[in-house]
Image (tube, rainbow, N blue to C red):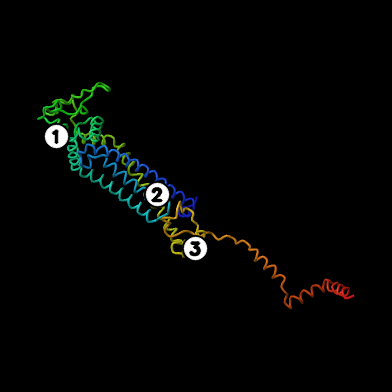
Amino acid sequence: MPSYAELRKTNHFYYVIKFTLNVYSMLFSLVGLCVLCVGVYAEVERQKNRTLEGLFLAPAVVLILLGLVMFTVSVVGMVGSLRDNKTLLHMFLCVLCVLLLLQAVALTTALIFEKKTSALFQSSIREGIKHYYDDLDFKNILDYVQQKFSCCGGDEYKDWGVNQYHFCNGTGPLACGVPYTCCVRGKVGEVINTLCGYQTLDKQRETLHDLIHVRGCIHAVNLWMSDNIGITVALCCAIGLPQLLGIILSCVFWNLLVDMSESVDMVDFKLKKAEFEYSELDLAGAGWCMCLPRDGGYLPVPAAEPELDPIDVHLEKLKKQLPRTHAQLRELQQSRSATGLDEVDVGRKQKREH
């Protein structure tokens, strides 16, 4: 079995790494484009009733930024792998490393400063609760989280007191209550009582366990992640491993291009005279156009056996018919005398004279 050093010198290794990286970048560019389109559509709808300005409270803005970054970075990697361009590949590699590092730092910071992170999310959620009925995106997300994780509010159920429809000094039917998504459901599929949380904010936690969920959603999500550590690790791997794969592929391909560009056989056609022809170079892998050429140039076309020119063949025949030197003539005469050809020639000469 060939070693890695021998394998990376083969054309098969070059093409496998090249097109694997290209397919990887193309898939992520398509995913990024889809995320970007969804974010733009959601933001257009959100602008009709614009109320929230916070980063955590505008899912459409997060989707737009995420899709834009994914699409831009992936296109850079795709073009760099297609064109064998070391500059673009190096940019792609550096951006992936920075993004992965930032995510690792953010995750580590969140774990170390858990209380400050919880306070940040709590203030963001409380700000969203103020505009709960004005922002449909945030309302749908919070309703889903409260039903999925059996929780209410950010830190606790009393966070709903900041909403103008739910604070206890109000006069409406929702005053001093919580949304129905906070309510405890006895049976699956039963008719939902939208006023099940009526007059619950001014009561103690101990008396509400059979009516509403009193635990805040921040604590409920943290508890779920702790109880399902396997799923949590799988989610982290699903986010980090594809980026790590892209880093490995781009690093291997970039080093391969560096070795190729440093080869003594490499020809950089950008430094040649303008009237040279591309037929002098092996443009395998050059791609669909000559823009963004491969850094370092291309290998020259392997020298083939020259075809015989008809003029050269004719000249060789003429050389054979040229007058012989004195030594060659004497050698030829001696060979003819030894075989008796001279006497035959003398007899023929005498017949012509008669």
Depth-wise, is mark 2 or mark 3 nearer the camera?
Answer: 3
Find the residue positioned furthest to the right: 354
Please tell me the numbered disc located at residue 30: none
User: Label 2 vs label 1: CA separation?
Assistant: 49 Å
Disc 2 or 1, which lies upstream in sequence? 2
Label 2 Cα neighbours within 10 Å, binned few <14 / some 14-19 / many ≥20: many
The residue positioned 76% from the left and 76% from the top of the image is 329
| Image quadrant in which you'd find residue 333 | bottom right
Q: Which residue type carries mark 1?
A: Val
Q: Which residue is mark 3?
A: 276
Does 325 appear above or below 151? below
- Please provide percent x and percent y for residue 312: 65, 66
**Position of the C terminus by quadrant:** bottom right
Q: Which residue is mark 2?
A: 78
- Is 227 positioned to the left or the right of 257 in the image? left
| Image quadrant in which you'd find residue 311 | bottom right
Q: For this rendering, which residue is in front, 2 or 279? A: 279
- Please provide percent x and percent y for residue 340: 84, 72
- Please provide percent x and percent y for residue 96: 33, 49
- Please provide percent x and percent y for residue 182: 20, 28
- Is 157 positioned to the left or the right of 17 in the image? left
Disc 3 or 1, which lies upstream in sequence? 1
Q: Which residue type carries mark 3?
A: Phe
Q: Name the element at disc 2.
A: helix
User: Label 3 vs label 1: CA separation?
Assistant: 76 Å
Q: Which residue is mark 1?
A: 162
Q: Which residue type carries mark 2?
A: Met
Find the residue positioned furthest to the bottom: 326
Disc 2 or 3, which lies upstream in sequence? 2
